[in-house]
Amino acid sequence: MSEGATILVADDDEGIRMVVTQALSRAGFDVRTTGNASTLWQWVEEGEGDLVITDVIMPDENGLDLVPKIRRIRPNLRIVVMSAQNTLLTAVKATERGAFEYLPKPFDLAELVSIVKRGLDNRTQSSLSSEHETYEVEEALPLIGRSQAMQEIYRTLARLMPTDLTVMITGESGTGKELVARALHDYGKRKSMPFVAVNMAAIPRELIESELFGHEKGSFTGAVNRNVGRFEQANGGTLFLDEIGDMPMEAQTRLLRVLQEGEYTSVGGRTAIKADTRVIAATHHDLKRLIRRGLFREDLFFRLNVVPIRLPALRDRVEDIPELVRHFLARAANNGLPWKIIEPEAIELFKDHPWPGNVRELENLVQRLAALYSEEVIGAEIIRTELNDGTTQSESPASASGGLADAVDGHLRTYFNAHDGSLPTAGLYNRILHEVERPLILQTLQATRGNQVKAAEVLGLNRNTLRKKIRELRIPIIKGAG
């Protein structure tokens, strides 16, 4: 029984200690509080307490560093970590180091009481193996945002990091589904092995089976050599199947066998190949609707949907927009574009925009602002023009090209109005070409993950010409080319 248990609370904020004490006392617990880590450690060493609640930032020691120390001497003592540093890395670190639960501030007191009861009722079970290896993660944020919606995502991801469970990520286009998949891989136990991403919508339907499972020489017309499939490429690592709703039924049947039996055969092959691969799927489609229409296998859905993660649309977490904008501005500057500052009034306009293209649309707009505008400080008028013109990623290619022309037109109007007759005598033509050409090549290289051969094909340039322009425009080399 959990009633009457002693809860040890460490937080340097007296107000937090007071409200936590009141809530837990009303729930029937005995509560001891302290404002520092050393006193908490002393209590734990003396065998006191049935559950620990600790803040991360305290005056004498980081609460995350205390977690593995406590677990070494009292492995069955549950630890709840609280933090106002509400990032994915905080949640991951808390879980990696052996915390029973991570609770971002501000938190709901009823949820805290529920977590405490759950922790006490299951305290005979160790939350993680005592041999669980802890390790530091890079101080780089794969996901951005401190909203409540993102906190729930972080907590879910932190629980999934040590597992091989199949995950289904859903959400509108542009919400960051591949970023979530990469985070699960990069901070999980398969991080040293390959991460292979495949977009089902980008592959001709008749080639998807060969793309995923490979094919043998002579298995069909044009198969002049044996082809290694994505499952084989991802062996030991993670295979991310994006837009799984666009997979044809024949390939669905093959995928189902892999998930059920842990093996597959290549197209035209007869020997079963073992699959040691974690599968993460994603889609913006309503798969249950596709099931009703006979376009998606229900048994495959249940195999993929072991752990569902629903990503929020950007309009549902507008409080994250300022942080996202700062992040994208910094990324643009790191890629060689001019550093920009966006006025607070302009940020408010961002918050009022519906963002049909979600985070991807926001990132594209920020990059465009950095590339096309000479002003160091971007004001509300420029943002209003951009948003009203509808020059966003979510448009069709035809309207997007028109939108780019409108954006350049608006940029030039602003430029001429600002100079008011005191125009430079020469060089404007080349300057505008330079400002457009550099981000065009840079974005193409990013889209092809640094593969200059593919980038040259997309741009319609000779490869040597592309290399020359990369040097002339001082475009940084992008790593990741296969």
Image (cartoon, grey):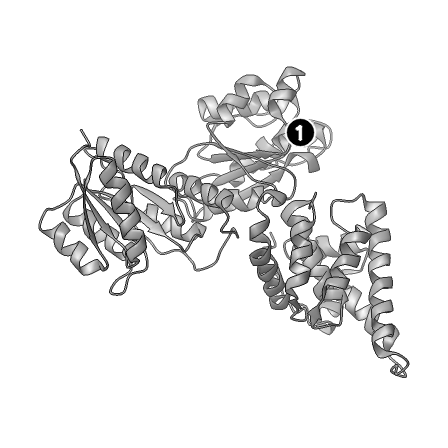
Which picture quadrant has residue 225? Answer: top right
Q: Is residue 464 visible?
A: no
Residue labelled with disc 1: 246
**Mark 1 is on which residue type?**
Asp
Which is nearer the eye, 224 or 318?
318
Count of numbered labels shown in the rendering: 1
Please say whether residue 12 is visible from this viewpoint.
yes
Residue 176 in the figure: left or right of residue 190: right
- Residue 215, quarter of the rendered image: top right
Q: Residue at x 69, y 35 (%)?
A: 201
- On the picture, is 121 further left or further right than 200? left
Q: Is residue 283 above or below residue 195?
A: above
Query: Where does residue 450 sit, x and y in percent of width and height?
Result: 64, 57
For the point 80% across and 60% down, the residue is: 462
From the viewer's perspective, tell me whether residue 149 is left or right of residue 17.
right
* Mark 1 neighbour density, 10 Å: few (under 14) some (14–19) many (20 or more): some
Place of residue 103 in the rendered image (x, y in percent of width and height, measured from the top left): 36, 45
Q: Nearer the viewer, residue 480 or 73?
A: 73
Q: Where is residue 209 in the image (x, y as percent from the top left)?
A: 63, 28
Q: In this view, does 121 lie above or below 467?
A: above
Location of the N terminus (image quadrant): top left
Outermost residue, left side: 46
Q: Nearer the viewer, residue 309 or 216?
A: 309
Q: Residue at x 49, y 23 (%)?
A: 303
Under tag 1, what secondary structure?
Answer: helix
Residue at 59% x, 62% y is: 326
Left or right: 371 with respect to 188?
Answer: right
Q: Position of residue 141 (x, y in %)?
A: 49, 55
